[in-house]
Image: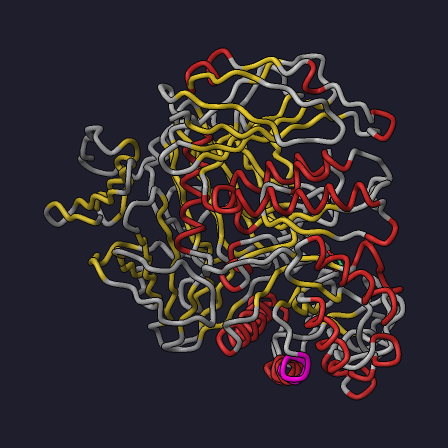
Amino acid sequence: MIKFIGNQICEISLKDWKVVLQVVDGRVIKIFDGPINEEYQTCESVAEDIHAYYPEIISSYGHIDYRESLVYIEDNNTFFTNRFIFNKWEQIVKQDDTEEFPHSRNKYETLRITYLNEAKTVQIEQFISVYNDEDTLVSNISIKNIGNTPIRIKRAMSLQLDIQDDGYKIMTFTGKWAHERHITNNEINYGTFKNSSICGASSSFNNPATVVYKDNKYYLMNLIYSSNHMELIQTTHNNTTRALIGMNDFMMDIPLEKNQSFTTPEATLTFGLDINMMKLNSNHFIERHILRKIDFPIIFNSWEGLSFGINRDNWKKLAKLASQLGCNIFVFDDGWYGKRNDDTSSLGDFYLYEEKMGTWEEINSCLENYKIGLGIWVEPEMVSPNSELYRSHPEYALETPNIKPVLGRNQLMLDFSNPKVVDHVYSTLKELIEKAHPRYIKWDFNRLVTEVYSLTSKGGNFFYEYEKGLYHLMNKLVSEYPDIIFEGCASGGARFDLGILYYFPVIWTSDCTDAKERIYIQEGTNLVYPMSCISNHVSCIPNQQTGLKSSLEDRINISLFGRYGFELDLVKENKADILTLKKSVEYYLKRKELIINGDTYYSYQNDINIKCWVTVNSDKSEALSYVASLNSPDRLVKFVGLDETTLYSISFRKQTNIEEEVVPPLTGKELMEKGITLSHLFMENDSEVNETKIATRVIRFKKVK
Ligand code: DGJ
């Protein structure tokens, strides 16, 4: 709720958190942020004093504040001295007006603050939106040229969080291909910490989600955008902390003619008194205000099983077995189109490779017989130099004249900043959809930007224009085909961000399906993003990415926590394992509602080599916990998130590699405070395949009536 007290104070009340702003001497100062019932004091005046840095919500160059600024604008008259001064504020209702750019849905109230530079040539509107029952707010800005001469935007970020003390820690979600979103903790004592990407994707290296925390204050910032982003956390000599998040200003140079404006993507700021509260607040916000609601099926994907060797004989055998497992969709991953037999050709030629695969009629009638739906993989933003598309339209590719382009996985990127290219890709996909009638589409993106020469947009606004083209296309397809289920993917999880999630509510989390590596990837991902968008598949051993073996049960246990599916050649699996997989589907389906819609809490054990999370339903009568020992000698596990006074029955998912064990019922308090010792429950009898040296269990707690 947004409430003005007189002309100068504005209280922004969230669920359990409150932010209070005050206008003092033309600046908007954040005089309080903290638990909703705490008292705050107002501020008398702002001294333009180098020793007195006030917590502001917007900053620009030109004040005696030499910290990083939210905006830098090159103005013909005053050149970089922007010095924005408060003009007015009002409460508005901000409509979900355009689907052409991703944004938070169903805003409750929005505070619009208008600022003008001293020369009155540039206006900034800052929007801060709140939602019913969320501890997240959203902020962005819109810059307008109201002068007579052109201006250029050199930096335009979306959210500023100033805190009046220092000593904060920073948590980021970092990694690389097959190793995405590992939790990384950093401490800054003095200076500026930067988390960012410049590769034209939110990236597997640095996810935009960034946590700034200390004691019982957790601030999680995130960006509703899929390209270059930047998060700056700065502490200075006067013991303050400034956090900024927004588009990266790398190469940024956005011209604005008279009366033109530029609006930044929305950034989110989620509060929490501890890490689990922050996590749940973030998960809930994304679930309720970013994702589209869908019923996501159980996917069987051809990639790890058949790879480019997919053909009409092997896919038929696999699809039949997939259907017998209980899967709903069989996905033709890479290799079904053009003349694609390896990664050196055909991207862009998304028509069926009939000699290899059969016709669409044959495919659809066969899948119908097996009672499994059709899924198709595409990579619409790419082109192979060896393709019909490149031969007929070389100008559609991103290449700099007279310079040898960098190839990534033998492919070039298409210039999505050019509307003609986007229109062409739209027609290709539309034709494919009309012919094949897929129920599901996986949208991949396997290389990053290296060439920024475009026929239509110059370097300075290329990345933003590219993203606009991408979102335009995604929006067009999801609106025209609302029944098709889309899954995002970028060499695994290199674009796991709120921009993609706005259109595609599930993302392929990582190409690494190794049972151990996956624990870190899923833990990091779920700390920010809800379980419902995390896609997990059971694959074969040795794992194709790590080369390591782990038991089938360990691979199942970790995959159950998210959108469950498979990618392995079932023809090569033995009957007992296929039966185990089939039973795992039944187990998952019985608990899907709890897994997808429950609240997942992390239990931090004394031994960091014991991992445990607990997914609890809304009345806490049922929970499902994942426990893993990463070769730890310790066997004590304490749980979290349960109701203290409820007595819970304890049942372990039946595993073929462990003898069944009965543990008598315990109260939530006992489970959380004393825990249980899982000594013999971790004794696997197939340890010879367990090269990852992990032992895992899925435990169900159910209220005893
Ligand atoms: C990368 C994806 O992450 C994989 O799942 C698979 O689709 C391959 N691309 C196909 O080229």
Q: Residue furthest left?
A: 6
In the image, is 641 to the left or to the right of 607? left
Quarter residue 105 falls in: bottom left
Residue, x 79% and y 88% (percent of image)? 392
Q: Which residues are magenta?
A: 430-436
Q: Main secondary structure of the magenta part?
A: helix
Q: According to the image, what is the colour scheme of the structure? A: secondary structure
Query: 593 and 535: which one is in front?
Result: 593
* Magenta-colored stretch includes residue 435: yes
In the image, is 4 to the left or to the right of 605? left
Residue, x 42% and y 37% (percent of image)? 617
Query: 251 and 356: which one is in front?
Result: 356
Residue 291 picture location, percent across and down: 46, 57
Residue, x 63% and y 84% (percent of image)? 434
Quarter residue 24 falls in: top left
Q: Is residue 282 above or below residue 392?
A: above
* Magenta-colored stretch includes residue 450: no
**Residue 24 in sight in this render:** no
In the image, is 311 to the left or to the right of 351? right
- Placement of the C terminus among the 4 image quadrants: top left
In the image, is 14 to the left or to the right of 531? left
Q: Quadrant of ligand 1?
A: bottom right
Residue, x 36% and y 71% (percent of image)? 97
Residue 574 picture location, percent across and down: 85, 44
Residue 631 picture location, percent across and down: 74, 20
Q: Is residue 607 above or below residue 421?
A: above
**Residue 282 in sight in this render:** yes
Query: 205 and 196: which one is in front?
Result: 205
Q: Is residue 409 above or below residue 340?
A: above
Residue 553 picture location, percent across and down: 73, 35
